[in-house]
Protein backbone atom coordinates (compact mmCIF):
# COMPACT_ATOMS: atom_id res chain seq x y z
CA UNK A 1 0.00 0.00 0.00
CA UNK A 2 1.59 3.26 -1.13
CA UNK A 3 -0.94 5.71 0.29
CA UNK A 4 -3.75 5.96 2.83
CA UNK A 5 -6.22 8.85 2.93
CA UNK A 6 -8.54 9.57 5.84
CA UNK A 7 -11.12 11.91 4.29
CA UNK A 8 -14.75 12.47 3.45
CA UNK A 9 -16.34 14.49 6.23
CA UNK A 10 -14.53 15.06 9.49
CA UNK A 11 -12.16 12.13 10.12
CA UNK A 12 -10.14 14.25 12.56
CA UNK A 13 -13.01 13.93 15.05
CA UNK A 14 -11.96 10.34 15.72
CA UNK A 15 -9.31 9.57 18.27
CA UNK A 16 -5.66 9.03 17.39
CA UNK A 17 -5.94 5.54 18.86
CA UNK A 18 -8.52 4.64 16.22
CA UNK A 19 -6.18 5.86 13.48
CA UNK A 20 -3.38 3.74 14.87
CA UNK A 21 -5.59 0.62 14.94
CA UNK A 22 -6.79 1.18 11.37
CA UNK A 23 -3.24 1.61 10.09
CA UNK A 24 -2.17 -1.54 11.92
CA UNK A 25 -4.99 -3.50 10.28
CA UNK A 26 -4.11 -2.08 6.83
CA UNK A 27 -0.50 -3.11 7.36
CA UNK A 28 -1.59 -6.63 8.34
CA UNK A 29 -3.80 -7.06 5.27
CA UNK A 30 -1.84 -5.31 2.52
CA UNK A 31 1.43 -4.08 3.97
CA UNK A 32 2.58 -0.47 3.98
CA UNK A 33 5.26 0.84 1.65
CA UNK A 34 8.36 2.16 3.37
CA UNK A 35 7.61 5.65 2.06
CA UNK A 36 3.81 5.42 2.38
CA UNK A 37 1.88 8.70 2.34
CA UNK A 38 -0.77 8.79 5.08
CA UNK A 39 -3.03 11.83 4.84
CA UNK A 40 -5.69 13.07 7.23
CA UNK A 41 -8.25 15.74 6.35
CA UNK A 42 -8.96 18.08 9.23
CA UNK A 43 -10.87 21.23 10.06
CA UNK A 44 -8.92 23.99 11.80
CA UNK A 45 -11.13 24.28 14.88
CA UNK A 46 -9.23 24.40 18.16
CA UNK A 47 -10.77 21.05 19.21
CA UNK A 48 -9.41 19.23 16.18
CA UNK A 49 -6.07 21.08 16.13
CA UNK A 50 -5.43 19.95 19.70
CA UNK A 51 -5.15 16.36 18.36
CA UNK A 52 -2.48 17.05 15.74
CA UNK A 53 0.44 15.93 17.91
CA UNK A 54 -1.27 12.62 18.73
CA UNK A 55 -2.26 12.04 15.10
CA UNK A 56 1.37 12.48 14.11
CA UNK A 57 2.45 9.90 16.68
CA UNK A 58 -0.25 7.51 15.40
CA UNK A 59 1.31 7.51 11.93
CA UNK A 60 -0.23 10.39 9.98
CA UNK A 61 2.52 12.08 7.96
CA UNK A 62 0.49 14.49 5.81
CA UNK A 63 -2.31 16.83 6.90
CA UNK A 64 -4.86 18.50 4.64
CA UNK A 65 -6.62 21.45 6.26
CA UNK A 66 -9.99 22.84 5.15
CA UNK A 67 -9.26 26.55 5.67
CA UNK A 68 -11.35 28.00 2.78
CA UNK A 69 -10.88 31.67 3.70
CA UNK A 70 -8.56 33.83 5.79
CA UNK A 71 -11.08 36.37 7.08
CA UNK A 72 -13.92 35.97 9.56
CA UNK A 73 -16.57 37.63 7.40
CA UNK A 74 -16.22 35.14 4.55
CA UNK A 75 -15.77 32.16 6.87
CA UNK A 76 -19.10 32.99 8.45
CA UNK A 77 -20.73 33.42 5.03
CA UNK A 78 -19.37 30.01 3.98
CA UNK A 79 -20.86 28.43 7.08
CA UNK A 80 -17.53 27.45 8.59
CA UNK A 81 -17.18 26.75 12.33
CA UNK A 82 -13.65 28.14 12.69
CA UNK A 83 -12.40 31.71 12.59
CA UNK A 84 -9.33 33.21 10.91
CA UNK A 85 -7.26 33.12 14.09
CA UNK A 86 -7.93 29.41 14.52
CA UNK A 87 -7.05 28.85 10.86
CA UNK A 88 -3.65 30.49 11.17
CA UNK A 89 -2.89 28.58 14.37
CA UNK A 90 -3.90 25.28 12.77
CA UNK A 91 -1.65 25.92 9.76
CA UNK A 92 1.31 26.57 12.08
CA UNK A 93 0.59 23.44 14.13
CA UNK A 94 0.23 21.26 11.04
CA UNK A 95 3.68 22.34 9.88
CA UNK A 96 5.11 21.66 13.31
CA UNK A 97 3.83 18.10 13.67
CA UNK A 98 3.64 16.69 10.14
CA UNK A 99 6.28 16.00 7.51
CA UNK A 100 3.98 17.42 4.84
CA UNK A 101 0.92 19.62 5.09
CA UNK A 102 -1.49 21.40 2.80
CA UNK A 103 -4.51 23.64 3.13
CA UNK A 104 -7.26 24.79 0.81
CA UNK A 105 -8.87 28.08 -0.06
CA UNK A 106 -11.98 28.93 -2.04
CA UNK A 107 -11.93 31.94 -4.37
CA UNK A 108 -14.42 33.76 -6.59
CA UNK A 109 -16.41 34.11 -3.38
CA UNK A 110 -19.30 36.42 -2.64
CA UNK A 111 -18.37 40.04 -3.47
CA UNK A 112 -14.68 39.13 -3.72
CA UNK A 113 -12.51 41.48 -5.79
CA UNK A 114 -9.33 40.74 -7.70
CA UNK A 115 -7.31 42.85 -5.29
CA UNK A 116 -8.73 41.07 -2.24
CA UNK A 117 -8.00 37.64 -3.74
CA UNK A 118 -4.47 38.62 -4.75
CA UNK A 119 -3.76 39.80 -1.20
CA UNK A 120 -5.23 36.65 0.38
CA UNK A 121 -3.46 34.29 -2.02
CA UNK A 122 -0.13 36.01 -1.45
CA UNK A 123 -0.63 35.66 2.30
CA UNK A 124 -1.46 31.97 1.87
CA UNK A 125 1.61 31.33 -0.27
CA UNK A 126 3.84 32.87 2.35
CA UNK A 127 2.52 30.31 4.85
CA UNK A 128 2.34 27.26 2.57
CA UNK A 129 5.03 24.59 2.56
CA UNK A 130 4.90 22.81 -0.74
CA UNK A 131 1.21 22.28 -1.49
CA UNK A 132 -1.92 24.40 -1.81
CA UNK A 133 -5.44 23.52 -3.05
CA UNK A 134 -7.41 26.39 -4.60
CA UNK A 135 -11.02 25.92 -5.68
CA UNK A 136 -13.46 28.28 -7.35
CA UNK A 137 -16.71 28.58 -5.42
CA UNK A 138 -19.48 26.70 -7.19
CA UNK A 139 -23.17 26.64 -6.38
CA UNK A 140 -24.55 23.10 -6.28
CA UNK A 141 -28.24 22.39 -6.78
CA UNK A 142 -30.10 21.49 -3.60
CA UNK A 143 -27.73 23.25 -1.21
CA UNK A 144 -28.50 26.24 1.01
CA UNK A 145 -26.13 28.28 -1.18
CA UNK A 146 -28.15 27.35 -4.27
CA UNK A 147 -31.43 28.62 -2.79
CA UNK A 148 -29.79 31.79 -1.44
CA UNK A 149 -28.16 32.44 -4.82
CA UNK A 150 -31.47 32.03 -6.65
CA UNK A 151 -33.09 34.54 -4.29
CA UNK A 152 -30.28 37.05 -4.87
CA UNK A 153 -28.90 36.86 -1.35
CA UNK A 154 -25.55 35.58 -2.65
CA UNK A 155 -23.89 37.42 -5.50
CA UNK A 156 -20.90 35.70 -7.10
CA UNK A 157 -18.32 37.32 -9.41
CA UNK A 158 -19.32 37.16 -13.08
CA UNK A 159 -17.68 34.64 -15.42
CA UNK A 160 -15.12 37.12 -16.77
CA UNK A 161 -13.98 38.10 -13.29
CA UNK A 162 -13.83 34.45 -12.20
CA UNK A 163 -11.70 33.65 -15.27
CA UNK A 164 -9.39 36.55 -14.45
CA UNK A 165 -9.06 35.25 -10.89
CA UNK A 166 -8.14 31.82 -12.25
CA UNK A 167 -5.41 33.31 -14.46
CA UNK A 168 -4.11 35.42 -11.59
CA UNK A 169 -3.99 32.31 -9.39
CA UNK A 170 -1.89 30.40 -11.92
CA UNK A 171 0.53 33.29 -12.38
CA UNK A 172 1.08 34.05 -8.68
CA UNK A 173 1.41 30.38 -7.66
CA UNK A 174 3.95 29.73 -10.42
CA UNK A 175 5.96 32.78 -9.34
CA UNK A 176 6.04 31.38 -5.80
CA UNK A 177 7.27 27.95 -6.93
CA UNK A 178 3.91 26.18 -6.64
CA UNK A 179 2.71 25.66 -10.21
CA UNK A 180 -0.52 23.80 -10.87
CA UNK A 181 -0.18 20.06 -11.40
CA UNK A 182 -3.97 19.55 -11.45
CA UNK A 183 -6.78 21.97 -12.23
CA UNK A 184 -7.21 23.02 -8.57
CA UNK A 185 -3.99 21.82 -6.95
CA UNK A 186 -0.57 23.45 -6.79
CA UNK A 187 2.68 22.00 -5.51
CA UNK A 188 6.42 22.30 -5.49
CA UNK A 189 8.15 19.42 -7.27
CA UNK A 190 7.83 16.26 -5.20
CA UNK A 191 5.04 17.62 -2.97
CA UNK A 192 2.09 16.50 -5.10
CA UNK A 193 -0.59 14.48 -3.30
CA UNK A 194 0.42 10.93 -4.16
CA UNK A 195 -2.94 9.56 -3.10
CA UNK A 196 -4.97 11.92 -5.26
CA UNK A 197 -2.66 11.26 -8.19
CA UNK A 198 -3.80 7.63 -8.02
CA UNK A 199 -7.36 8.82 -8.79
CA UNK A 200 -6.32 11.11 -11.63
CA UNK A 201 -4.03 8.51 -13.23
CA UNK A 202 -6.73 5.84 -12.84
CA UNK A 203 -5.03 3.46 -10.45
CA UNK A 204 -6.85 1.00 -8.22
CA UNK A 205 -7.95 2.21 -4.79
CA UNK A 206 -10.05 0.72 -2.01
CA UNK A 207 -12.85 2.78 -0.46
CA UNK A 208 -13.58 1.91 3.16
CA UNK A 209 -16.30 3.35 5.39
CA UNK A 210 -19.82 4.74 4.93
CA UNK A 211 -20.34 6.33 1.52
CA UNK A 212 -16.84 5.44 0.28
CA UNK A 213 -16.18 4.66 -3.38
CA UNK A 214 -13.46 2.48 -4.86
CA UNK A 215 -12.02 1.13 -8.09
CA UNK A 216 -10.62 -2.36 -7.69
CA UNK A 217 -9.41 -4.96 -10.17
CA UNK A 218 -10.28 -8.57 -9.36
CA UNK A 219 -11.34 -11.57 -11.40
CA UNK A 220 -9.60 -9.98 -14.36
CA UNK A 221 -11.97 -6.97 -14.43
CA UNK A 222 -12.09 -3.46 -12.97
CA UNK A 223 -14.99 -2.93 -10.59
CA UNK A 224 -16.61 0.27 -9.30
CA UNK A 225 -17.66 -0.21 -5.70
CA UNK A 226 -19.57 1.99 -3.29
CA UNK A 227 -20.40 1.51 0.38
CA UNK A 228 -23.71 2.18 2.10
CA UNK A 229 -23.94 5.88 2.97
CA UNK A 230 -25.74 5.36 6.26
CA UNK A 231 -23.19 4.57 9.00
CA UNK A 232 -25.81 2.43 10.75
CA UNK A 233 -26.59 0.40 7.64
CA UNK A 234 -22.89 0.11 6.76
CA UNK A 235 -22.17 -1.26 10.24
CA UNK A 236 -25.16 -3.60 10.09
CA UNK A 237 -24.13 -5.15 6.78
CA UNK A 238 -20.50 -5.24 7.86
CA UNK A 239 -21.45 -7.31 10.88
CA UNK A 240 -23.87 -9.64 9.09
CA UNK A 241 -22.31 -9.93 5.61
CA UNK A 242 -18.66 -9.17 6.28
CA UNK A 243 -18.71 -5.97 4.23
CA UNK A 244 -20.74 -2.80 3.72
CA UNK A 245 -20.61 -2.70 -0.08
CA UNK A 246 -23.91 -1.59 -1.60
CA UNK A 247 -22.95 -1.49 -5.30
CA UNK A 248 -20.38 -3.53 -7.20
CA UNK A 249 -20.34 -2.88 -10.95
CA UNK A 250 -17.99 -4.43 -13.47
CA UNK A 251 -16.90 -1.58 -15.77
CA UNK A 252 -16.85 -2.06 -19.53
CA UNK A 253 -14.22 -0.45 -21.76
CA UNK A 254 -16.42 2.53 -22.66
CA UNK A 255 -17.02 3.34 -19.00
CA UNK A 256 -13.33 2.98 -18.16
CA UNK A 257 -12.32 5.16 -21.10
CA UNK A 258 -14.70 7.95 -20.09
CA UNK A 259 -13.41 7.92 -16.53
CA UNK A 260 -9.79 7.90 -17.65
CA UNK A 261 -10.40 10.86 -19.95
CA UNK A 262 -12.34 12.90 -17.38
CA UNK A 263 -9.78 12.27 -14.64
CA UNK A 264 -6.64 12.42 -16.75
CA UNK A 265 -7.44 15.77 -18.33
CA UNK A 266 -7.57 17.32 -14.86
CA UNK A 267 -3.81 16.92 -14.72
CA UNK A 268 -1.63 19.61 -16.25
CA UNK A 269 0.48 16.90 -17.87
CA UNK A 270 -2.71 15.33 -19.25
CA UNK A 271 -3.52 11.74 -20.19
CA UNK A 272 -0.65 9.30 -20.62
CA UNK A 273 -1.50 7.85 -24.04
CA UNK A 274 0.66 4.74 -23.60
CA UNK A 275 -0.98 3.99 -20.25
CA UNK A 276 -4.41 4.50 -21.82
CA UNK A 277 -3.59 2.04 -24.61
CA UNK A 278 -2.17 -0.50 -22.18
CA UNK A 279 -5.30 -0.42 -20.03
CA UNK A 280 -7.84 -0.58 -22.87
CA UNK A 281 -5.99 -2.16 -25.77
CA UNK A 282 -7.00 0.69 -28.06
CA UNK A 283 -5.95 4.24 -28.86
CA UNK A 284 -7.79 7.13 -27.25
CA UNK A 285 -9.25 8.21 -30.61
CA UNK A 286 -11.65 5.27 -30.40
CA UNK A 287 -13.44 6.89 -27.48
CA UNK A 288 -13.48 10.60 -28.31
CA UNK A 289 -15.07 12.86 -30.89
CA UNK A 290 -12.04 13.37 -33.12
CA UNK A 291 -13.65 16.13 -35.19
CA UNK A 292 -14.39 18.09 -32.00
CA UNK A 293 -10.87 17.39 -30.72
CA UNK A 294 -9.38 18.77 -33.93
CA UNK A 295 -11.43 21.93 -33.46
CA UNK A 296 -10.08 22.25 -29.92
CA UNK A 297 -6.54 21.95 -31.30
CA UNK A 298 -7.25 24.76 -33.74
CA UNK A 299 -8.70 26.98 -31.01
CA UNK A 300 -5.71 26.34 -28.78
CA UNK A 301 -7.71 24.62 -26.03
CA UNK A 302 -6.09 21.18 -26.35
CA UNK A 303 -2.76 19.79 -27.50
CA UNK A 304 -1.32 16.33 -28.08
CA UNK A 305 2.13 14.85 -28.66
CA UNK A 306 3.39 11.26 -28.86
CA UNK A 307 2.97 10.78 -25.13
CA UNK A 308 0.13 12.92 -23.75
CA UNK A 309 -3.20 14.54 -24.56
CA UNK A 310 -3.72 17.63 -22.42
CA UNK A 311 -5.72 20.80 -22.00
CA UNK A 312 -3.71 23.95 -22.58
CA UNK A 313 -3.55 26.84 -20.14
CA UNK A 314 -6.33 28.38 -22.23
CA UNK A 315 -8.48 25.25 -22.14
CA UNK A 316 -8.00 24.15 -18.54
CA UNK A 317 -10.51 26.61 -16.97
CA UNK A 318 -13.07 25.46 -19.59
CA UNK A 319 -12.45 21.77 -19.00
CA UNK A 320 -15.95 20.80 -17.84
CA UNK A 321 -17.61 22.26 -20.91
CA UNK A 322 -14.95 20.84 -23.26
CA UNK A 323 -15.49 17.34 -21.94
CA UNK A 324 -19.16 17.49 -22.90
CA UNK A 325 -18.25 17.66 -26.58
CA UNK A 326 -15.13 15.52 -26.40
CA UNK A 327 -16.67 12.32 -25.07
CA UNK A 328 -18.65 10.24 -27.56
Image (cartoon, rainbow, N blue to C red):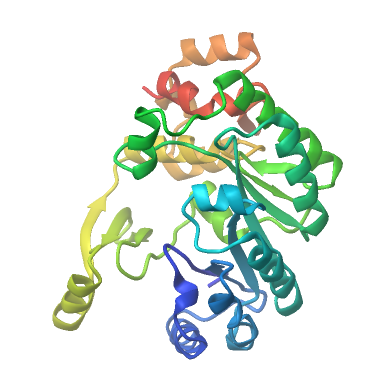
The correct choice, above or below, for 32 with respect to 140 in the image is: below
Q: Residue at x 71, y 64 (%)?
A: 88
Q: Is residue 213 at least partly visible in the picture?
A: yes
Q: Which of 132 and 114 is in front in this view?
A: 114
Q: Which residue is drawn at 41% across and 40% down?
A: 259
Within the image, what quadrant is residue 2 found in?
bottom right
In which quadrant of the rendered image does the C terminus lie? top left
- In the displayed structure, does residue 252 sit left or right of residue 267? left
- In the displayed structure, does residue 84 sit left or right of residue 241? right
Percent coordinates x, y for residue 264 in the rendering: 54, 39
The correct choice, above or below, for 304 with respect to 203 in the image is: above
Percent coordinates x, y for residue 246 in the rendering: 20, 62
- In the displayed structure, does residue 292 sit left or right of residue 236? right
The correct choice, above or below, for 67 with respect to 45 in the image is: above
Q: Is residue 302 at least partly visible in the picture?
A: no
Percent coordinates x, y for residue 131 in the rendering: 71, 55
Q: Nearer the viewer, residue 91 or 64?
A: 91
Q: Residue at x 25, y 71 (%)?
A: 231
Within the image, what quadrant is residue 37 found in?
bottom right
Numbered disc total: 0
Percent coordinates x, y for residue 191 in the rendering: 73, 58
Amino acid sequence: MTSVFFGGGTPSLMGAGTVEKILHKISENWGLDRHVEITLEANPTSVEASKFKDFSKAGINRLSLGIQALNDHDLKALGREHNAKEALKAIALSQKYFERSSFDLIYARMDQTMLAWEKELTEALQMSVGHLSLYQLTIERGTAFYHAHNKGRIILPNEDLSADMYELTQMICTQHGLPAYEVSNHAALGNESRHNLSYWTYRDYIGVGPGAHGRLTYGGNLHALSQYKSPEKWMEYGMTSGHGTEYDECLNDQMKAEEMIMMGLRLVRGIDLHDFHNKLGAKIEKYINTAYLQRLFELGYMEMDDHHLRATALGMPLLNSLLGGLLK
